[in-house]
Image: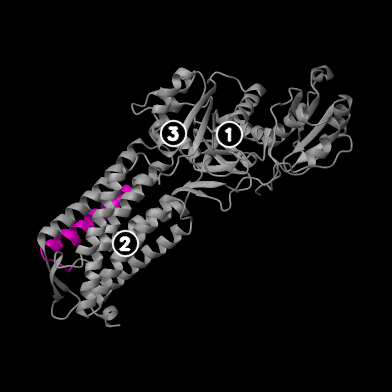
Amino acid sequence: MDFLTSPLGWKNWLLLISALINLGMAIFILSRGVKNKINLYFSLLALSCFGWGTSLFVSLAFFDLTVSKFFFQTSYLSAWFISVFLFYFIFYFPFPTRVIKKIHRNIIIGVSIAISFVVYTKTHILDFGRINNAHEVYVTYFKPFYILYSLLFIAMVCYSLYILWSKYVNIESHFKLGTKLLFITILIGLVVGAYFDLFLDYFDIHSYIWVGPIFTIPMNLVVFYLVAFNRKQ
Amino acid sequence: MTKTKKKICLLLAGGTWTVDKAKNMLAVNNTGDVDLWLNTMPELGILSAVETEFVVNEEAQLSFSLWEKLATLIIKKEADYDGFVVVTKAERAILTATVLNFLLQNFKKTIVVTASQMSGAYTKEKKEIMQDLIANQGGLGLRSNLINAVQVAGEELAQVAVMFGSRLVAGIKAKLEYQQGKYVLSSVDDDYLAKIDFGISYKNNLAYSKNLTKKYQNLSRGLCIIDDYLQEKNLWPKEAFVNYQAVLVFLHDEELSLEQIKYFKSLEKTVILYHPQYLQQEKDFSTISSCTKETVIAKVLWLMANVAESDWPKMLKANLIDEFVNFKK
């Protein structure tokens, strides 16, 4: 259990806690009814966040390079699914205001399948290792794919936020507060996640990759607040 | 395979005030207003295949014929739609829901009643309240109420329900209060069919009633409703009751005074005593309790028009549509 007691351990702890919070919220929301698309897509979003946090945790905490690399690659796949399920969740929350065309659905599925394969190849990571055998990794990316992936990810999240903002502007009464709080927390998650886990990574600064998953917690807190402190209005 | 949208009929009977993007007030006062009004809520068309039926305008008074017309329309269009949403004035919503509950007992299509926070024919004197609502909650609430109601109408509900704000309540349990400039819906026994928190969360196992559907289209006009508190000091002359077949008395105490017993006996009419929770049995009068005020009005109006008078005492005691409730303490 060295990873928990070592100087870097608390970062792993935070990663683990944030992942477990996401898992707990996924189960909690899913238990409210899978038929409801809002519940379904939020649970999938929270599960993707759990996958992101867990895969980063494992890749940082385990010394076996093969295991570590596999989970590091998986974290990119999980992050992509965060953007996909965030889009679907926002699309249905609190109710759909537009229609997703079949071609758009197919594009999302196609890109997701492509990313699922490519992240595990040399097109994504050229070289992976540990610095001084410690809880820090060095990664050499194939930059064109990294840029394309980052742009796709940011585009998906920004478009989702745009939909949420336009809903907030037009929405009435009790939905207003929930939409606003979700917008703020998702925006914070995007900015922090994109900065520490995409931007700094691009410039070979990998010391802060544990920060992004932690900022998925505020979004969960907002959802928990909406469910648990629901008032008559 | 494309999922077919549920077909929902919107019955417009007042309570249609809403605002467009420019915050201009819109309401449906004739069939010509419907398209413009509906255009302010494009989400409805995404959620369901919505069709509208104009029933009455904002000026229309609450009347028996309105309820009978609504029931007749729903019966007539039953086969064409998966569910019905009745839009009416907020202050009428619960009574409308309970009356429809008795007219369309154990109906196998979902009926949801909803409303705007504001309604009526005159807008000038309500301008300030309207502006407050727009500033505080982005509109008059109808749009979100209707969006929720249309979704709910696609589900299976055993009874006519009221969708308002963040709650869906069976009409027979609903309570609407005016608090801090707006209406708030709650349930008299804290039992909700759905809550709007993170989307719509339905209560488990919602389904149509397994009991036989009974449809009625008539309500009695012969009921006089009096409040014993108002009557206490100034008893009405007997002549005031000439045109009525029965008298429904809302009691504030659990039993009548001797003077009241004597007075009600002298009317020579069927007298029904109502208290929401407790009631002493009176051998000369029928009694009903453990239900809401709106429920007892609706039940008696239905009873008088559709059941032989000799059966009234028995029917008043019968739990026809699960109308008896345990009030929250």
Which of A231/A161 is in front? Answer: A161
In the image, which disc is placed on residue A49? 2
Tell me: residue B311, above or below residue A183. Answer: above
The residue stretch that appears in magenta = A183-207
Residue located beneath label 3 in the image: B143
Q: Do labels 2 and 3 share a chain?
A: no
Label 2 SS: helix
Front tag of 1 and 2: 1
What residue appears at the point 88 percent right and 25 percent down from the top-left corner? B268
**Quarter-wise, where is residue B63 in the image?**
top right
The chain that hosts pointer 2 is A
**Quarter-wise, where is residue B226 in the image?**
top right
Real-space Cα separation, disc 3 to disc 1, in angstroms: 27 Å
Please provide percent x and percent y for residue A24: 41, 64
Residue located beneath label 1 in the image: B79
Amino acid type assigned to the residue bearing label 1 in the image: Ala
Label 3 SS: helix
What residue appears at the point 51 percent right and 41 percent down from the top-left corner? B154
Please provide percent x and percent y for residue A87: 31, 50
Please provide percent x and percent y for residue A28: 45, 60
Which secondary structure class fits the magenta region best? helix
Of the two numbered discs 3 and 1 on the same chain, state the one appearing first in sequence.
1
Amino acid type assigned to the residue bearing label 2 in the image: Cys
